[in-house]
Amino acid sequence: MHEMAFTQGILHIALTEAAKHQAAKVLDIRIKVGVLTGLLPEFVQEYFNIVSVGTVAEQSRLSIEKVPATIKCLNCGAASETEGFVFTCPTCNSNRIRLLGGREFYVDSLEVE
């Protein structure tokens, strides 16, 4: 259910930017979502359809790009994508890693008219 709070944040950003640029309508909102956030894109879209009713963002399209989890091994220096919550280096099997990506959640851009 934490998707609702994030979705309200998306709407706030879209409405603020639309007002800044005197836009009549928000057509598309492009969002980057890291796979490790636990956010489900289908819920984000569903909640957005609800919270945007009556605003210039109503019926706008959410384009959600999933950002893969990426790690860097602190032993061998290899950088790689990882599946799910597996945090071991595929090159040397070390679990001494640094998380580089996969926790992102932000509005990348808006298309307005």
Image (cartoon, rainbow, N blue to C red):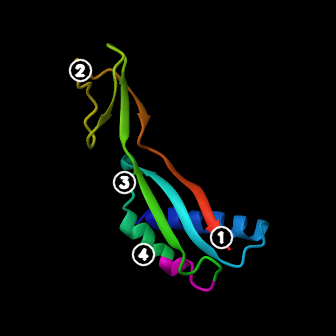
Task: Classify 10 Å Cα crowding around label 2: few (below 14), some (14-19), many (20 and above).
Answer: few
Residue 49: where, in percent of width, then height?
Answer: 49, 78
**Residue beneath label 4, please?**
46
CA distance separating discs 1 and 2:
45 Å
- Mark 2, residue position: 91
Chain-order first, disc 2 or disc 4: 4
Q: Quadrant of residue 24?
A: bottom right
* Total marks placed: 4
* Viewer-side residue, 12 vs 14: 14
Compute the Cα span from label 2 to label 3: 26 Å
Q: Residue at x 26, y 24 (%)?
A: 89
Q: Amino acid at mark 4?
A: Glu
Give the residue at mark 3: 38
Instruction: Inspect the image, locate mark 3, and give the three-letter code of the amino acid beneath it.
Output: Gly
Do tag 3 and tag 4 residues touch (Cβ < 8 Å)? no
Give the alpha-carbon distance from disc 4 to disc 1, as whole Å. 21 Å
Residue lying farthest to the top in this orientation: 75
- 33 is higher (above) or lower (below) than 82: below
Sequence-earlier tag: 1 or 2:
2
How packed mark 4 is, by other alpha carbons closer than 10 Å (few <14, some 14-19, many 20 or more), is: few
Tell me if residue 34 comes above or below residue 91 in the rendering: below
| Magenta-colored span | 49-54
- Give coordinates of residue 42: x percent, y percent: 37, 68
